[in-house]
Image: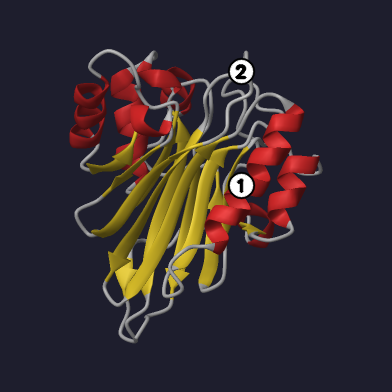
Amino acid sequence: MDDLPESATEADGSAVVRVLSYNVRSLRDDHDALVRVIRACAPDVVCVQEAPRFFRWRKKAVRLARESGLVTVTGGATASGPMILASLRARVLRTEDVLLPRTPGLHQRGFATAVLGFGAARLDVVSCHLSVNAAERYDQAGLLLERVATSDDAAATVVGGDFNARPGSPAFDRIAAELRDAWAVRGWGGEYTSRPGDPVQRIDAVFVGKGVEVLGCGVPRGLPGVTESDLRAATDHLPVLAALRLAPRP
């Protein structure tokens, strides 16, 4: 497997940023294995899905961030599950948690959002976990695109999430019509994300907007420090790791 570019600030002011998207299943599995996977990926930003959101959820989130060498940015219970973590390299410029309209009988959903600075570049980050219901999921895909359309004009956009939808499905393709599927642009590592022992589908993804160059994106199988045993033990999804180049902004 080719090496994925490491985080860097380049001579022209552009920034190479590693973004990890990971459904952690409310930390119900092997915490130490999860931490080892995150650390091995060396992310600048983590878009978490199914973050802790009930009893002492902040304490659990802070522990995960601290042991992974990161800090909490926003989200968790306040976004009904999505959360954003970041390395100390990132400057937090703005955050907002968004709760989505809820269909009776289905789980509350939301977005965790933040604008982060990396040198002279800015990155507008959205972490999301869309519905298991097809009709609600399609509507949420539209709300996600509306949110991205109102983002900071000076910031590049990245969306990391568990979309509960495969490429070719209405919700996934609705998003892919407006944003670029990073795996489709430059696939790296593994493709399928569910389930860890026998992955047969790609329902977790990273999408990017204007101003973002994809240097590689995929499941970090074979990355030094990431073992098959840890991937299976950490949670019931496989992570998606992307290396992105952001242009400097005036």
Task: Say left or right for 210 vs 46.
Answer: right
Tell me where residue 59 sits by quadrant. Answer: top left
Which residue is more in the foreground, 81 or 64? 81
> Horizontal and vertical percent for residue 63?
20, 27
- Spatial separation of the CA atoms under disc 1 and disc 2: 17 Å
- As drawn, 142 above or below 236: below
Secondary-structure class at tag 2: loop
Label at residue 143: 1
- As drawn, 74 above or below 135: below
Q: Residues within 10 Å of mark 2 (few under 14, many from 20)?
A: few
Which residue is more in the foreground, 200 or 121? 121
- As drawn, 124 above or below 127: below
Q: Residues within 10 Å of mark 1 (few under 14, many from 20)?
A: some
Query: Label 2: which residue?
Result: 106
Name the residue: 45% across, 70% down: 245
As shown in the figure, which amino acid type bears the numbered disc 1?
Leu
Q: Would you say residue 3 is visible in this rendering? A: no
> Horizontal and vertical percent for residue 39?
30, 40
Mark nearer the N terminus (1 vs 2): 2
> Horizontal and vertical percent for residue 140?
64, 40
